[in-house]
């Protein structure tokens, strides 16, 4: 299997859930190699795995031993992916997940997946933990700092306007 094929496949894996899904698909294909019927390789390949994986596996008319080797290569590549933990205030759309994954991967300099947690308490922005480092880019952090500096003054102005 070419490294380009493997990179193309890994570019479909943005989150821990994507990673787990691909890992299950690889396991399922491997289990099906020497079975027939509904549990057989051809059926599983056609119905139970993503298109990108099926295309890599069936790019040529190859033996089941070579398929087994390709699945092992994919499994090894998945083992080299590192998780970046990110906390967001709300569930992001898939397009935003891809943008975050691209940005973080560019700055991390290696193959990564996102472990996304949702915490509305951060208000907005993100908390990021990776490789023993932690960064708080949340709005809550900025809001609390701003409130500590100017909160009482702003509250007085608001009371005057509201009850004035």
Image (cartoon, helix red, strand yellow):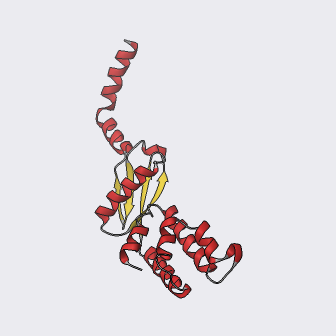
Residue sitting nearer the eye, 138 or 73: 73
Please tell me in which quadrant of the rendered image residue 113 appears: bottom left
Q: Residue furthest front?
A: 61
Q: Left or right of 30: which side holds 140?
A: left
* Above or below, comparing residue 145 to residue 18 in the picture: above
Q: Quadrant of the N terminus?
A: bottom left
Please tell me in which quadrant of the rendered image residue 114 appears: bottom left
Q: Position of residue 53 (x, y in %)?
A: 49, 70
* Above or below, comparing residue 130 to residue 99 in the picture: below
Q: Position of residue 30 (x, y in %)?
A: 58, 79
The residue under the point 39% across, 66% down is 112
* Above or below, comparing residue 58 to residue 148 in the picture: below
Q: Left or right of 45: which side holds 153?
A: left
Q: Quadrant of the C terminus?
A: top left
Q: Left or right of 54: which side holds 152?
A: left
Residue sitting nearer the eye, 29 or 89: 29
* Above or below, comparing residue 35 to residue 160 in the picture: below
Q: Residue furthest top?
A: 164
Total count of labels: 0
Q: Position of residue 66 (x, y in %)?
A: 50, 86
Residue sitting nearer the eye, 88 or 46: 46
The residue under the point 42% across, 41% down is 123
Q: Residue furthest right?
A: 37
The residue under the point 38% across, 50% down is 126
The residue under the point 29% across, 32% down is 150
Residue sitting nearer the eye, 104 or 139: 104
Q: Residue furthest bottom?
A: 65
Q: Position of residue 153 (x, y in %)?
A: 30, 27
């Amino acid at each position: 299997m070419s490294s380009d094929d493997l990179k193309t496949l890994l570019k479909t894996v943005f989150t821990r859930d994507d990673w787990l899904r691909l890992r299950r698909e690889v396991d399922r294909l491997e289990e099906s190699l020497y079975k027939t019927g509904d549990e057989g390789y051809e059926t599983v390949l056609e119905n139970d795995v993503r298109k990108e994986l099926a295309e890599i596996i069936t790019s040529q008319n190859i033996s089941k031993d070579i398929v087994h080797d390709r699945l092992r290569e994919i499994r090894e590549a998945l083992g080299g992916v590192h998780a970046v933990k990110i906390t967001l205030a709300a569930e992001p759309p898939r397009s935003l997940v891809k943008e975050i994954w691209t940005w973080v991967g560019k700055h991390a300099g290696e193959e990564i997946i996102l472990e996304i947690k949702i915490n509305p308490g951060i208000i907005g922005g993100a908390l990021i933990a990776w490789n023993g480092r932690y960064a708080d880019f949340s709005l809550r952090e900025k809001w609390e700092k701003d409130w500590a500096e100017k909160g009482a003054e702003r509250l007085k102005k608001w009371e005057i306007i509201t009850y004035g």
